[in-house]
Image (cartoon, rainbow, N blue to C red):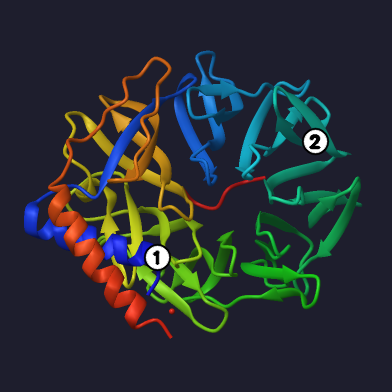
Amino acid sequence: MRGWDCLILGTLLARALCATPIYHVSLLGNLGGVDIAPAGVNSSGQISGTAANAQGDYRAFLYDGAQIKDLGTAGGQQSRGGALNNSGQVAGTAYYDSGTGGVVWQGGSYTAIGGAGTWANAVNNSGQVAGAASYGGDTHATVAAGGAIQDLGTLPGGSWSSAYAINDQGQVVGYGDTSSGRFRAFVWSAEEGIEMLGTLGGSQSYAMAISGNGLIAGHSTAGNGYTHAFLWNGLVMTDLGTFGDGNSHAYGVNSAGDVVGYSDGSGFSGTHAFLYHQGGLLDLNSLISPVAGLELIEAYGINGAGQIAGAALWNNQEVLYRLDLINTFAPASSAGVPVIHNPEPGTLVLALIGFALLAVGISGRGKKPPRSL
């Protein structure tokens, strides 16, 4: 059992015993508009994504640990931010009158990736960028590195594909169309090329995230016609279910197999953010102390430390949030929106249970609908 798994199990048990929260929540603001959608959280807790400004224009952003920064438009009219790496490089796309261009932002400047007709959706710690490019009217998933762009191709019979995530081994995931016109998830590697994944009994699937050890998260149509989040471990595609009603979508996964996303459900309107952990789908709203006017509606990224990034409604305003596991929290400041720190739990009980489970683990050790371009 992994140490972080033990910590989560310990805190879950402690919560059951002491009615204490699992996470601290920090509300980190927005860019002045009505929408915000993070795309990833790195090992330092920095968050990237896309947000609307007060004028209603969309901008790539970076939460750098102190504030949300508008990354600009790279000379275009609007921009969209994708996932980031541990160096704070943010992949994204600028939108011009003539089309699109993939870019990577870092330190207040940007670098174009491939020129016109390209999109950048994620960047790994080696600087490889996953995205897509136009080829003679078709769109193909790509990986860009060292000034060159590699065409990853399409699925059998298809003419459109796009890559949405890449890990440090260079494995890429995304989805593409097939000869039937349906979309299917894929994984690509330099050794195996592009491989089509299955579904949860329906006709379509979408891969949106991949962990460092190759676990894949996304969503698929199920046999009942609804869309359900999934976790794929290389052999089996697991249906993560919903909160009792409708659809669920997954957008983030870490190497422990913890998945985040959002789901419809019974008893609330709209969606609630979820954490899937060791076979259970947990409503993130139930893992924090109640905050007046706050509802965690979406989760898009989770890192190896268990930090989660997503979008919340706070007094009917959509804001960025980050969740930090209790006892590993570092205070964060905010631009325009207060940071809310949940009260401390019974730390002694948490510590005792956590240490007990960690000892067991050591002794037993021997394991929003699909994004558009």
Name the mark on residue 339.
none
Q: Residues within 10 Å of mark 1 (few under 14, many from 20)?
A: some
Which residue is pictured at 49% across the width and 22% down the height?
A: 67
Position of 366 relative to 261 (above/below): below
277 with respect to 355 (left or right): right
Which residue is pictured at 29% across the width and 60% down the height?
A: 8
Which residue is pictured at 62% across the width and 46% down the height?
A: 372
Give the image location of residue 32, x and y in percent.
46, 17
14 with respect to 185 (left or right): left
Nearest the viewer among 307 and 206 is 307
Q: In the rendered structure, which disc, 2 or 1, sits on the residue that comes first in sequence?
A: 2
| Residue 244 visible in rendering | no
Nearest the viewer among 351 and 150 is 351
Residue annotated with mark 2: 101
Which residue is pictured at 67% across the width and 69% down the height?
A: 187
Give the image location of residue 357, x and y in percent.
25, 70
Which amino acid lies under the numbered mark 1 shown in the image of this protein? Answer: Tyr
Tell me the SS state at disc 2. strand
Circles 2 and 1: CB atoms closer than 8 Å: no
Nearest the viewer among 297 and 333 is 333
Give the image location of residue 202, x and y in percent.
49, 74
Name the mark on residue 226.
1
Which amino acid lies under the numbered mark 2 shown in the image of this protein? Answer: Gly
Give the image location of residue 258, x and y in percent.
41, 63
Q: Image quadrant of residue 240?
A: bottom left
| Residue 2 visible in rendering | yes
